[in-house]
Image (cartoon, helix red, strand yellow):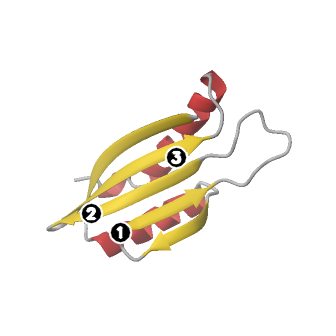
Amino acid sequence: MSKVSERRTYRGDNAAVREALLRAGDEAGLKVSAATSDSAVVMGESFQLLSFSWPAKVTALLSGEGANTTVDYTVSNFGFGPLQANKVKSVLAKVTSALSSLEA
């Protein structure tokens, strides 16, 4: 299993960051599979028949710290090796780049 984890801090409360995260996931082509209140979001890619890489799953755990929110990202997929690792890293980059304007 290929997996990458990262922690980022954003300006704004949990609800605002969660909404921005859902928009970023939508723009990246990810479908929300579970959104639990303001504390967790799970998104994933659709399976594509002719793809060389497995679909990635993004788990984002949100925790508020006053006016800032910390998001712990974990992105993973089933396979291993350089193709799968690059896929996981690129999905994380898509999601975090869309939220770069909120970074504290």
Tag count = 3
Residue named by callout 2: 63
Q: Please identify, in this view, whether the residue under mark 3 or under mark 2 is nearer the observer.
A: 2
Furthest-right residue in view? 50
Residue at 71%, 35% (x, y): give it.
53
Dot 1 surroundings within 10 Å: few (below 14), some, or many (20 or more)? Answer: some
Dot 3 surroundings within 10 Å: few (below 14), some, or many (20 or more)? Answer: some
Q: Which mark is residue 94?
A: 3
Whether label 2 touches label 1, CB < 8 Å: yes
Q: Which mark is residue 39?
A: 1
Dot 2 surroundings within 10 Å: few (below 14), some, or many (20 or more)? Answer: some
Q: Nearer the viewer, residue 87 or 99?
A: 87
For marks 2 and 1, the one nearer the N-term is 1
For marks 3 and 2, the one nearer the N-term is 2
Residue at 34%, 75% (x, y): give it.
15
Q: From mark 1 to mark 3, how far is it between C-alphas?
A: 21 Å
Where residue 19 appears, x then y in whole percent?
43, 71
For marks 1 and 3, the one nearer the N-term is 1
Residue type beneath disc 3: Lys
Whether label 3 touches label 2, CB < 8 Å: no
Splitting the image into 4 quarters, where does residue 83 fall?
A: top right
Q: Please identify, in this view, whether the residue under mark 1 or under mark 3 is nearer the observer.
A: 1
Q: From mark 3 to mark 2, how far is it between C-alphas?
A: 21 Å
Secondary structure under the numbered disc 2 in the rendered image: strand
Horizontal side of residue 34 vs 9, given as left or right:
right
Where residue 22 appears, x then y in whole percent?
49, 66
Q: From mark 2 to mark 1, how far is it between C-alphas?
A: 6 Å
Horizontal side of residue 57 vs 70, given as left or right:
right
Secondary structure under the numbered disc 1 in the rendered image: loop
